[in-house]
Image (cartoon, coloured by chain):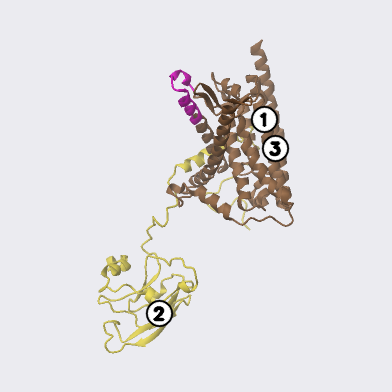
Chain colours: A brown, B yellow
């Protein structure tokens, strides 16, 4: 349907996809909090939340409801605009990253090819990096605007940690991009049909994974919210749903980074060792299966994140900086140079 | 002063102070080891239980809430002699004695009885000295504990709260309250 030279079906299709992805991220983040509590409990020989609904499945709803009804406190000494802006930014940047991720195979409806990706821009992975690095503003502004020394310290820590770990992350990624030769997310996935990138870039993946933990502020890199030294860090002064937004953004980030890592290194929606396109299934069914596969991979990553959180204690701050600058960056550089040499040699 | 190589327990281990090897400096092997230890706990039997639905059985010598006993005909055994109150190290027990009137023989076993009998469960340390002190087998510690309450007053247990159900009127309740003791005798 073309009206005013605009393809309205295209806009409708994208709007539906955006709504779907955003609500999916929210839902996954909600149940990630539940999963976190359950996994923490299981790893510590406990049962975990089991009161709200069967097996405690309604616990996230109860938590959310509680956060909405809590008193909203804005400290007098804070700068109010920035204080509100902090959690808003954290939430927006967390949700924005999902825009370029290819969620599954495209499928056709009434002769139209519908892509399961909101925008296949030609700088896809750079867009993710850009938005992720914006995420630090949520922490910084929130910590700064609280006018609390603990929050400020946490914000400084968070900012320097994120900047430090973005470097090796980017360097690990450059090695990957040398293999693909394209920044589009869709071509990164298509490039892995023969074999996943993890086979060619195990060290690169390890570096990327460690940096992803740091970028998501997950243990052992949760220094910005170190409970026992900074009293909860940058969101100490926050209450009610503003606090909820910060916590929620963290879980959305975790989900998205799981999806990004599956896409970059684990073939995205690709099923290993089978050629699913040759099954002769309907395109929408194939799309659904691909989506399920990607979600499974992301869920495994979320489990891994939680498993690590409840096993490894937090780094000391100097150890964190040491690891980032003196270990990961040289390693990533070596990985990059070796990959470049091998790619050049093979192309000769 | 204790000599340096003396061991406090048999489990004491000499700490290896040698500098770490390159393999150990990687940390990743030890991290993986730790992660598999926690994963092992993931599948282990849980140490906690779903409390109100599921309850642990107490040990046979568990000392819980006090119960004022009756004899087989449903008469209160307590004669308000006050030995339990004297024995109580926490001073949790108070009582007032009264004389049995003619026609009350079916209520009280002997001529003197406790008109008031109170135990402050916030003071009680559940030592069981009251049970030991009682010459009339009138008080014993049961296998339950004092439930939570909203106020302090709720923890001062009156005679009505402490008395065992009458075996004539409520034999099931009597047997239940008697619990392990019924088997013992």
Q: Which chain carries label 3?
A: A
Q: Which residue is drawn at 59% across and 31% down?
A: A260
Q: Is A273 inside the magenta-drawn segment? A: yes
Residue underneath mark 3: A134
How far from the left and from the top, in percent, is residue A21? 56, 35
Residue that lies at the very extreme toward the top in this rendered image: A348
Q: Distance between the residues labelled 3 and 1?
A: 11 Å
Examine the rendered structure and indicate whether residue A299 appears above or below residue A202.
Answer: below
> Would you say B60 lies left or right of A161 here?
left
How far from the left and from the top, in percent, is residue A302? 54, 37
Q: Which of marks 3 and 1 is nearer the N terminus?
A: 1
Residue underneath mark 2: B117
The magenta span reads: A272-292
Residue that lies at the very extreme toward the front in this rendered image: A4
Residue nearer the viewer, A28 or B40:
A28
Q: Is A346 inside the magenta-drawn segment? A: no
Tell me which corner region of the image, top left, top right, bottom left or bottom right, holds residue B184. Answer: bottom left
Q: In which quadrant is the C terminus of chain A drawn?
A: top right
Of labels 2 and 1, the one closer to you: 1
Q: Distance between the residues labelled 2 and 3?
A: 71 Å
> Would you say A247 lies left or right of B132 here?
right
Examine the rendered structure and indicate whether residue A29 appears above or below residue A270.
Answer: below
How far from the left and from the top, in percent, is residue A129? 67, 32
């Amino acid at each position: 349907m073309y009206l005013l030279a605009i393809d309205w079906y295209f806009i409708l299709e994208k709007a539906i996809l955006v709504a779907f992805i955003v609500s999916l991220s929210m839902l996954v983040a909600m149940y990630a909090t539940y999963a976190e509590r359950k996994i923490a409990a299981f790893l510590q020989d406990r049962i975990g939340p089991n009161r709200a609904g069967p097996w405690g499945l309604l616990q996230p709803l109860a938590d959310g409801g509680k956060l909405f009804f809590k008193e909203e406190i804005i400290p007098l000494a804070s700068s109010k605009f920035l204080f509100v802006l902090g959690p808003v930014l954290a939430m927006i940047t967390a949700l924005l990253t999902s825009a370029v991720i290819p969620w599954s195979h495209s499928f056709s409806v009434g002769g139209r090819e519908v892509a399961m990706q909101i925008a296949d821009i030609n700088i896809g992975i750079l867009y993710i990096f850009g938005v992720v690095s914006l995420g630090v503003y949520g922490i910084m502004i929130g910590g700064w605007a609280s006018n609390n020394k603990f929050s400020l310290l946490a914000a400084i820590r968070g900012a320097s940690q994120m900047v430090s770990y973005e470097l090796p992350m980017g360097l690990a990624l450059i090695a990957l991009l040398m293999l693909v030769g394209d920044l589009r997310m869709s071509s990164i996935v298509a490039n892995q049909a023969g074999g996943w990138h993890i086979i060619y870039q195990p060290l690169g993946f390890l570096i990327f994974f460690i940096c992803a933990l740091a970028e998501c502020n997950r243990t052992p890199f949760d220094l910005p919210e170190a409970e026992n030294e900074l009293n909860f860090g940058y969101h100490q002064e926050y209450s009610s749903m503003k606090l909820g937004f910060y916590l929620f953004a963290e879980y959305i980030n975790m989900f998205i980074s799981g999806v990004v890592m599956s896409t970059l290194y684990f073939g995205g929606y690709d099923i290993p060792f089978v050629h699913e396109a040759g099954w002769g299934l309907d395109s929408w069914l194939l799309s659904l299966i691909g989506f399920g596969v990607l979600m499974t991979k992301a869920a495994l990553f979320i489990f891994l994140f939680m498993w690590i959180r409840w096993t490894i204690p937090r780094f000391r701050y100097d150890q964190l900086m040491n690891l980032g600058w003196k270990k990961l960056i040289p390693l990533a550089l070596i990985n990059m140079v070796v990959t470049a040499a091998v790619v050049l040699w093979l192309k000769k | 002063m204790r000599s340096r190589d003396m061991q406090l327990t048999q489990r004491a281990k000499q700490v290896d102070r040698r500098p770490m090897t390159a393999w150990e400096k990687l940390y990743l092997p030890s991290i993986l080891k730790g992660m598999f230890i926690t994963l092992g706990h993931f599948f282990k039997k849980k140490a906690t239980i779903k409390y109100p639905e599921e309850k642990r059985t107490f040990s046979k010598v568990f000392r819980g809430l006090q119960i004022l006993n009756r004899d087989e005909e449903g008469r209160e055994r307590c004669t308000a002699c006050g030995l339990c109150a004297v024995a109580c190290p926490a001073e949790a027990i108070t009582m007032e004695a009264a004389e049995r009137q003619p026609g009350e023989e079916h209520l009280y076993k002997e001529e003197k009885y406790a008109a008031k009998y109170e135990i402050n469960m916030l003071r009680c340390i559940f030592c069981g000295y009251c049970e030991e002190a009682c010459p009339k087998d009138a008080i014993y510690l049961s296998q339950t504990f004092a439930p939570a309450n909203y106020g302090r007053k709720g923890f001062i247990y009156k005679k009505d709260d402490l008395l065992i159900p009458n075996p004539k009127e409520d034999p099931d309740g009597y047997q239940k309250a008697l619990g392990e003791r019924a088997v013992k005798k």
